[in-house]
Amino acid sequence: MMGNISGIAGTIALSGVGTVLLVWLGAPLPFLFGPLVACLLAALAGMPVAKPGKLGMLMRTVLGVAIGASITPELIERAPQMVISLAMVPVYVIVIACIGIPFFRRVYGLDQPTAFFASMPGGLQEMTAFGEESDANVRTLTLIHATRLLVIVLVAPIIMVVGFGADLDNPIGAPAATLPLHELVIMAAAAIIGWKVAARIGIFGAAIIGPMVLAAALSLGDVIHYRPPSEAILAAQFFIGMGLGAGYAGVTLAELRKDAFAGLVYVVIVAAVAAAFAEAVILMRLAPALDGFLAFAPAGQAEMAILAIVVGADLGFVVLHHVIRVFFILTCSPIAARLLGFSGPRTGDQ
């Protein structure tokens, strides 16, 4: 236990150094990229780095509350306008799967369960959990999905700035000292209660989904009127970056050559499909360009929520599309796995 605490403490310190360095250099998103780059370089150099674990989950609850607080009556009124773009999400997932499964099977020779869950653009934890139940190669799945998330988080801000003229210096929230104390207390309670209740029910992504649902109810009920303070959002960035970088701990050169490179090639394919769907949404005027891009970017809810916040995008619109994507994958992938002839995870376990 003490060794694990020491490992996390050391990784936090290393992440802090990376953050301070990027702040000093004036780099964009230092609280996200500082920990990410520092932990990634340390992991690739063979240094012991630890994932944030429960602390990282706690920070994800901040994003859940931020997303939920962005679901306002005004967003609900606009929901009918989103029907077409939301309906495109399952089609998007199916297209990616139809490309990804044969890609991993024929090009990289992965076994069927591993190829199937490697091709799913879902969360890293969820896909590795499903893969483990289906006798897939969990280490390969972890590296492929970690590479997908890492590349998108690193490249997406560049695309937003160069391609869309976005500003990465948008205010991410008000300082804690300027927010009503009672709303801070309510948001903190919503984060913890929502997380624990969702985890007890067995919902995947409970640290985000539970607080999001509870905070949305409070927002629609006119109980909360603010997002979590900027300090909390920065802390969430810090631990998400740390987790992404530390995901490469213990990786070998052989794994980098095969699994991580497979993930790198695949992310290019997935990004091309995502770009096509985002372009369709933009051309049909279903969303502004930046919102359409972020809504179909094939990364996790947490990472896309952070990027939507820092560029001032419509957080509710963006994350709602990612929630639909993840929900569709979690509910349909076990069924699809059985139809493809191998034993998928039991839907009752979700």
Image (cartoon, grey):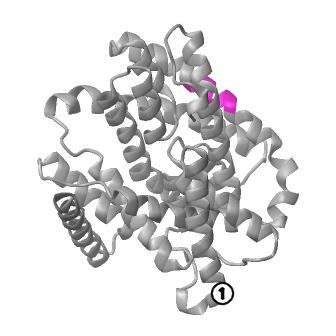
Residue span colored magenta:
90-96
Q: Is residue 311 above or below residue 222?
A: above
Does residue 311 lie above or below 45 as drawn?
A: below
Residue at the spot of label 1: 182
Q: Position of residue 68 (x, y in %)?
A: 67, 63
Q: Residue 69, relative to residue 324: is it above or below?
A: below
How far from the left and from the top, in percent, is residue 63? 55, 63
Question: x, y (%) of residue 112?
Answer: 42, 13
Give whichever of 274, 223 is nearer the camera.
Answer: 223
Residue at (25% x, 25% y) in the render: 258
Q: Is residue 309 visible?
A: yes
Residue 105 left/right relative to 13? right
Measured as percent of width and height from the top left, residue 243 is found at 34, 54
Residue at position x 64%, y 53% in the image: 319
Near-viewer residue (208 or 89): 208
Direction top: furthest residue: 341
Secondary structure character of the magenta stretch overall: helix
Under circle 1, the secondary element is helix
- The amino acid type of the residue labelled 1 equals His
